[in-house]
C-alpha cells in the first residue's frame, strides 16, 4: 500500500542505477523479443516496451541500434534494408525528446506517405528540417531538404518504426505545448523541448556556428537566452557561473554575459524592451532545452553582468517549477 513519489532528477538516477544492475544487453533484448514473438505472434514497439519492462532509451542505445535493428537481430522478417539503414537507424535516438504536435505530426506524415517539400510553407519546411536533420545530419538536409525526404522513402522498415515512435512520444509527452503565436514562421511551441540546432533551424539560421548561451536573432528581433540551471565548475568557468534560477512560476532571474554593461548596445536592448527575450531552460548540460516562452523586463540591477528578472508571459508547468526550485536550493 506504499507509494514513493520521486522528482524527475531523482527518478532518473534511480532508474539508471536499476538498469545497470539488471544489465540490459542487446542479447537479452533479442531473447526477450524472440520469446514474446513465440507467445504473442506479432509484437509492436509499444507491446515490447510494456512486456519487457524496458524504456525507449534502452532500445536506442548505440549497441542496439533501434527498433528496426533489434527486430532484424531477432530474425523477424521485415522489408529489405537499404545500405545505409543501420546508420540512419542509430540516429533515430536523436528524436526521442520530441514532445510537440508539429514535429510529431510531421514525423507521422513522413512515416506514412511521401511528403512533397515544395508544397510546404516556410514554417512547415523548418519543421521538416528539424526532423530530417536528426536522421540524416544537418549539413546534408540544408543542402537538399527534398532529397532527404526522398531518401527516407527508401526505408520502409524505418518508416514503420518512426510511425510507432511518433505515437509513443505523443503519449509520453509531459506537457501541453502552446504555439508561439506572434512569430508565425517560427515553429516553436512553449513548454516543448528543443536542442540547440533545432532552435537555430526554427529561426532560420541553421548551419551558423553558435556556441554562446545568448544570440540576437535580427530577422525577428529576438534575443535567444539559453540557460543551464544545474551548473558545474567542471564545465563552467567562474565568469560563466551565472545566477539563473526561477523565482516563481512566472518570474525568472537571469544574468547577462559577464562583459555586458547596462550602457552597451546589448544592455540597452535588454533594458529598453527593444527586442523579444526568448528563454530556453535545461536542467543538466546534456539535456535538451525547454522553451519557456517570452519574458518581459520586470527589474534589473548591477553591471557586468546585469541581473534581470523576467516576467514570463506563460507560467511554468508546476512540475518544472518544483524541479527548478530544488536545483536552486
Image (tube, helix red, strand yellow):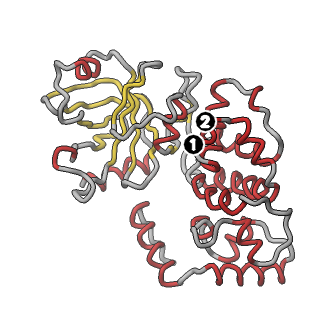
Residue 229 lies, in percent from the top left, at 31, 49
Residue 205 lies, in percent from the top left, at 50, 29
Q: Which residue is mark 2?
A: 142
Q: Dot 1: what SS?
A: helix
Q: Which residue is mark 1?
A: 138
Q: Dot 2: what SS?
A: helix
Is 292 left, or right, of 126 in this rendering? left
Residue located at (20% from left, 20% from top): 264
Q: Residue 109, can we see it?
A: no
Q: Answer yes or no: do the residues labelled 2 and 1 have beta carbons within 8 Å?
A: yes
Residue located at (76% from left, 71% from top): 71
Residue located at (67% from left, 60% from top): 89
Q: Quadrant of the C terminus?
A: bottom left
Residue 158 lies, in percent from the top left, at 75, 57
* Real-space CA distance between mark 2 and mark 1, rounded to the nearest whole angstrom: 6 Å
Residue 28 lies, in percent from the top left, at 65, 83
**Quick one: which residue is furthest to the left in this view?**
302
Quarter of the figure with residue 246: top left
Residue located at (33% from left, 39% from top): 212
- In this rendering, the answer to whether 3 lies above or below 237 is below
- Seen from the viewer's position, the closer of residues 8 and 33 is 33
- In this rendering, the answer to whether 221 lies above or below 29 is above
Q: Residue 163, can we see it?
A: yes
- All told, the count of numbered labels is 2
- Seen from the viewer's position, the closer of residues 138 and 328 is 138
| Disc number placed over residue 288 in the picture, else none | none
Amino acid at each position: 500500500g506504499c507509494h514513493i513519489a520521486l522528482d524527475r532528477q531523482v527518478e532518473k538516477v534511480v532508474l539508471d542505477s536499476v538498469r545497470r544492475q539488471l544489465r540490459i544487453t542487446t542479447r537479452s533484448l533479442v531473447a526477450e523479443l524472440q520469446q514474446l514473438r513465440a507467445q504473442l505472434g506479432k509484437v509492436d514497439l509499444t507491446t515490447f516496451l510494456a512486456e519487457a519492462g524496458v524504456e525507449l532509451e534502452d532500445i536506442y542505445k548505440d549497441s542496439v541500434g533501434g527498433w528496426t535493428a533489434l527486430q532484424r537481430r531477432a530474425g523477424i522478417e521485415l522489408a529489405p534494408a537499404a545500405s545505409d539503414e543501420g546508420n540512419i537507424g542509430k540516429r533515430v535516438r536523436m528524436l526521442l525528446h520530441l514532445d510537440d504536435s508539429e514535429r510529431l505530426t510531421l514525423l507521422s506524415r513522413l512515416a506514412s506517405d511521401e511528403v512533397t517539400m515544395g508544397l510546404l510553407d516556410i514554417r512547415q519546411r523548418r519543421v521538416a528540417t528539424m526532423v530530417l536533420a536528426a536522421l540524416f545530419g544537418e549539413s546534408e538536409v540544408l543542402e537538399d531538404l527534398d532529397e532527404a525526404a526522398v531518401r527516407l522513402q527508401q526505408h520502409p522498415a524505418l518508416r514503420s518504426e518512426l510511425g510507432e515512435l511518433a505515437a509513443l512520444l505523443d503519449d509520453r509527452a509531459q506537457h501541453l505545448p502552446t504555439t508561439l503565436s506572434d512569430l508565425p514562421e517560427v515553429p516553436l511551441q512553449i513548454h516543448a523541448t528543443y536542442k540547440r540546432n533545432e532552435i537555430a533551424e526554427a529561426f532560420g539560421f541553421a548551419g551558423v556556428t553558435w556556441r554562446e548561451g545568448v544570440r540576437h536573432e535580427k530577422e525577428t528581433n529576438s534575443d535567444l537566452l539559453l540557460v543551464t540551471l544545474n551548473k558545474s565548475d567542471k564545465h563552467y568557468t567562474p565568469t560563466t557561473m551565472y545566477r539563473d534560477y526561477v523565482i516563481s512560476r512566472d518570474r525568472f532571474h537571469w544574468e547577462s554575459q559577464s562583459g555586458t554593461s547596462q550602457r552597451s548596445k546589448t544592455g540597452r536592448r535588454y533594458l529598453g524592451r527593444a527586442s523579444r527575450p526568448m528563454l530556453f531552460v535545461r536542467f543538466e548540460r546534456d539535456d535538451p532545452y525547454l522553451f519557456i516562452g517570452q519574458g518581459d523586463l520586470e527589474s534589473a540591477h548591477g553591471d557586468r553582468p546585469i541581473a534581470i528578472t523576467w516576467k514570463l508571459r506563460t507560467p511554468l508547468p508546476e512540475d518544472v517549477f518544483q524541479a527548478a526550485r530544488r536545483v536552486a536550493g
